[in-house]
Image (tube, rainbow, N blue to C red):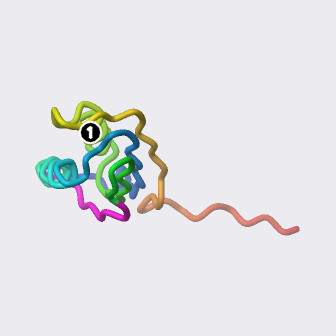
């Protein structure tokens, strides 16, 4: 299966709640791997997990949905997403001042 590179994004995902990172981080890694998303964890604490993921937006959406449900010992209050870098996107236009 060939994926369109235009739909691939780098996003920063912040998961807030009672996230019990010792069990949730490996859970997120497994699910991201199953979806074919690359991931890099930036912070993992008891109340917040922050990671960057890269892949098609539809699969990042699926990871977000999975994380919102999470494993049984985790309570997610909020998930924040921010685009870090869109691949194959032209740079913003520069206008003279």
Rendered location of residue 96, percent (x, y): 84, 69
Query: Main SS type for the magenta part?
Result: strand
| Residue under the image location 63 percent in, 61 percent down | 92
Farthest residue, direction right: 97
Q: Residue at x 29, y 44 (%)?
A: 19
Q: Is residue 63 above or below residue 2?
A: above
How far from the left and from the top, in percent, is residue 6? 38, 54
Magenta part of the chain: 35-43
| Residue identifier under label 1 | 67
Evaluate whether residue 2 shows in this view.
no
| Residue 40 magenta-highlighted | yes
Residue at (88, 68) in percent of width and height: 97
Query: Foreground: 11 or 89?
Result: 11
Q: Is 80 on the left-hand or right-hand side of 73?
A: right
Residue 1 x, y percent position in the rendering: 12, 51
Question: Local crowd at mark 1 within 10 Å, few (<14), some, or many (≥20)?
Answer: many
Q: Would you identify the image quadrant in which residue 17 lies?
A: top left
**Residue 10 in view of the camera:** yes
Residue 54 in the figure: left or right of residue 86: left
Q: How many marks?
A: 1
Q: Closest to the observer: 62 or 46?
A: 46
Looking at the picture, how far across and down is residue 13, in whole percent?
A: 39, 50
The residue shown at (22%, 36%) is: 70
Residue 50 magenta-highlighted: no
């Amino acid at each position: 299966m060939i994926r369109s590179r235009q739909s691939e994004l780098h996003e920063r995902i912040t998961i807030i709640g009672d996230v019990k990172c010792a069990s949730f981080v490996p859970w997120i890694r497994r699910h991201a791997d199953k979806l074919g998303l690359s991931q890099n964890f930036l912070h993992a604490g008891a109340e917040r997990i922050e990671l960057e993921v890269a892949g098609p937006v539809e699969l990042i959406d699926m990871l977000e949905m999975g994380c919102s449900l999470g494993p049984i010992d985790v309570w997610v209050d909020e998930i924040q997403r921010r685009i870090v870098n869109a691949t194959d996107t032209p740079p913003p236009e520069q206008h003279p001042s």
